[in-house]
Amino acid sequence: MTSIGTGYDLSASTYSPDGRIFQVEYANKAVENSGQDLSHSTAIGLRVKDGIILAVEKLVHSKLLIPEANRRIQTLDRHLGLATAGLLADGRQLANRARDESANFRDSFRSPAPVKYIADRLGSYIQVYTLYSSVRPFGISTIIGGVDQNGPSLFVIEPSGVFFGYHGAAVGKGRQLAKTELEKLKLSDLSMRQAVLEAARIIYLVHDDSKEKTFELEMSWVGNDTNGLHVPVPKDLLSEAEQKAKAALEDFE
Amino acid sequence: MDHFPTNWGRPRNDGFDAYGTYPIAQRPYNGLGNDVFSEGVQRTQQPIVTGTSVLAIKYKDGVMMSADNLASYGSLARFKDVQRLHPVGNNTIIGAGGDMSDFQYIQALLDDLMVEEFTEQDGHALGPGEIHEYLSQVMYARRSKMDPLWNSLIVGGVQDGKRFLSYVDLLGTTYSASTLATGYGSYIAQPLLRKAVEGNEDVITEEEAVKILEQSMKVLFYRDARSLNKYQIAKITGDGVAISESRSVDTHWSFADGIRGYGAQTQ
């Protein structure tokens, strides 16, 4: 970034001479960084035959925190879930907006909102924060997953506001490694249970042990196995997945 | 005749006395503080498409409720496939009499509420107690705006292993009892239900409860000119909610043969 310090990075409303918006690029950096109010972690999403699995590596920055409290995966509607990497508070704000969007769609059309519609609305919402010098772009990458009339779908929204649909998605610090692992999977053939096990394995794999920080695995799913509801993965399946993930990690090393 | 050409072809303001035809003290005043819409704004002043009675009783395993499938347009039996028993969450049913469009609005309102609670993901779900309280607040708020939701509602369910049965209406009035009925049913069926149920709430089996409701629905069909011999029965137990398919009871009308006003008239 040779153009840093040239003054073009002070506002999201100014392009640099080579056509970049530095504030948006810095927002992408914020997604990976560490700190107490930042997640410093990885989130992944898997789209399989009859459902979606979301998983996050939730770093525990203090031993005083209550285990399993402060959930990182949020529920937007009966059929919609959202996981973020980056600034936690930005994730909350976005989830609240998403809940409003979903409720508005429901009120207007008396049917649950398609996942793509919510991704589109959130993408537009995030993009607006890249236009003005008075606001800061969102410091989060978002995975939004759910099941609608067209089956399961999964989207990732970046701080710039662009969104793409994926079969498998990874955002945050360990996304590169997670993506290569996701690419090895035959996602369209997996059952939801199998996908839960794979998701747990990938999160354990991408966790960076060197930082001495422990982490919690948080997973949710939505699809045929859950009657179309976005709910946390049940405790017994979660602990089974964790055990298998740990075993697989030892084999790997 | 209006003698001001600029007013020709324009709407007339009857409030303005252009020719001073009134004594000054009696002239209509259109200035501030006189809301010209105060008498023009129309609120819901009568129900249009209506459902009739809802019946509900407590029994051994929970709560049972019934309502017919008719939505009347005045005295016309307009819609004969309307479900007036509506599940909310996993252990609550509301039954509605009164205006059916207001009831549909209430259904949407409750759906939004349930989604909002679901997204909290805190392990708590709203039960019949909370839903009834919410409804009573909504109904009372609307009647206080002089714009009531024109329904009488019965909320039934099982919460923490205890039966819940309560009533709320367009005025926000609430009460609880082991038997409840709305509309015409509160005159005709309520005494029958009380006789059958009161004191026996912990004894009545599911089969007996169905019989009690069937009997009352039959009497209502004979007596209530806005009823239909096609109704549903819902039960709420600790296991959840079940609403039956539409059913009917056998009725006999031979007694009506000679009564003027019942059958085809010969003279």
Image (cartoon, coloured by chain):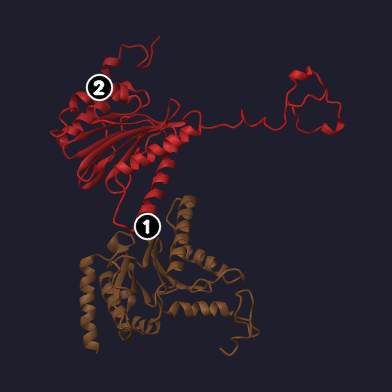
Chain colours: A brown, B red
Farthest residue in the left direction? B203
Q: Can I make out residue B5 in this image?
A: yes
Give the mark nearer the N terminus: 1 vs 2: 1
User: Which residue is labeled 2 in the image?
Assistant: B191
**Three-letter amino acid code of the residue under disc 1:** Thr
Q: Can I make out residue A190 in this image?
A: no
Q: Viewed as shown, does residue B151 lie left or right of B26?
A: left
The residue lying at 72 percent from left, 29 percent from top is B30
The residue lying at 38 percent from left, 41 percent from top is B134
Q: Which chain contains the residue that carries disc 2?
A: B
Q: Secondary structure at mark 2?
A: helix
x and y percentages locating residue B59 in the rendered image: 18, 35
**Three-letter amino acid code of the residue under disc 2:** Pro
Depth check, front residue: B79 or A21: A21
**Badge 1 and badge 2 in a common chain:** yes
User: Which residue is labeled 1 in the image?
Assistant: B119
Depth check, front residue: A117 or B199: B199
x and y percentages locating residue B168 in the rendered image: 36, 33
Q: Quadrant of residue A1?
A: bottom right
Labelled pair 1, 2 in contact (Cβ < 8 Å): no
Q: What is the crowding at mark 2: few (fewer than 14 residues within 10 Å), some, or many (at least 20)?
A: some
Q: What is the crowding at mark 1: few (fewer than 14 residues within 10 Å), some, or many (at least 20)?
A: many
Q: Which chain contains the residue that carries disc 1?
A: B
Image vertical order of residue A103 relative to residue B250, above or below: below
Depth check, front residue: B36 or B232: B36
